[in-house]
Image (tube, rainbow, N blue to C red):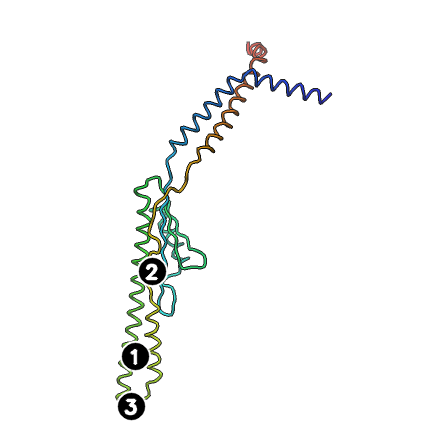
Amino acid sequence: MDNIQEEINLISIINVLIKNKLIILSFLVIGIAFSSVATFLIPKTYESEGVIRVGTSAGGGLLENPEQLASTINFTSSDKYPSSRLTVVAGTRLIDIKNYSSNKDQVMNPVAEVASKILSDHQIILDHNKNKLETGIKNYESTINRLMQSGQQIAILQQDVFTMQAELSDFSPSEIVKEPTVFVAKKTSVLLNILIGVVFGIFLGVLVASIREWWRKNKDEIRRVVS
């Protein structure tokens, strides 16, 4: 008995859909048309990307911790560059700078500005550390000259000078290893949007058809109750 009832209900639903096929097809066409138009009206999102390698100081130490640097800039620049993001390439001293915008002409500006500021700040740090080391070398050399004149042993001091001179070769400035470039970050899928339009159109069409059928069956009762 239950199976018969289910078959009757299924047949009723199919009959309702067939009876209202024009309504369902109309909403289907509207859904496809709307999704197609929306696909071409949605603006493209452009992405700009640049990569910086953090420089080194005496002993091979980094001029600045990449993780801390990226975190600081992400926090302090969130108001000025809300669509920009700095990330550190795992296991390296590379910092990836990205920015997103719907304006192709302006998407690169934040990346270039952030990169320029990092290079400028790191150059100041490098110059300071290098000048400090060179001053130390000069002081040692001056001391060695005085001791040589007095006939004292200077081997240890000379070794220190050689060590510091070798450390001068450890200095390397931060540099851009990938110039900022611009490309389309997100491509709109026409097929996907049309598919969404088809599903949405059919859903609305079936919904309207169901409401219409319900009203046809119950309108007399509703009018009687209301009146």
Q: Residue furthest bottom?
A: 151
**Residue 53 image point, x, y percent:** 37, 58
Residue type (three-letter) at the residue carrying disc 3: Gly
Q: Dot 1: few (<14), some (14–19), or many (≥20) neighbours within 10 Å?
A: some
213 w.r.t. 122: above or below:
above
Residue 18 image-quadrant placement: top right
Residue type (three-letter) at the residue carrying disc 2: Ser
Q: Is residue 214 left or right of residue 31?
A: right
**Residue 171 image point, x, y percent:** 33, 67
Which residue is found at the position 34% from the left and 48% from the top?
Answer: 181
72 w.r.t. 60: above or below:
above
Dot 2 falls on a residue whose secondary structure is: loop
Residue 47 image-quadrant placement: top left
Q: Dot 2: few (<14), some (14–19), or many (≥20) neighbours within 10 Å?
A: many
Residue wearing tag 1: 140
Q: Dot 3: few (<14), some (14–19), or many (≥20) neighbours within 10 Å?
A: few
**Residue 94 image point, x, y percent:** 39, 57
Task: Give the mark nearer the N terminus: 3 vs 1.
Answer: 1
Dot 1 falls on a residue whose secondary structure is: helix
The answer to whether mark 3 and mark 1 are in CB contact below 8 A is no
Of tags 3 and 2, which is closer to the observer?
2
Task: Give the mark nearer the N terminus: 2 vs 1.
Answer: 1
Label 3 vs label 2: CA separation? 44 Å
Q: Which mark is residue 174?
A: 2
Circle count: 3
Q: Is residue 209 left or right of residue 132?
A: right
Residue wearing tag 3: 151
Which residue is found at the position 48% from the left and 20% from the top?
Answer: 26
Dot 3 falls on a residue whose secondary structure is: loop
Q: Depth check: 19 or 212 in front? A: 19
Quadrant of the image for the C terminus?
top right
Residue type (three-letter) at the residue carrying disc 1: Tyr
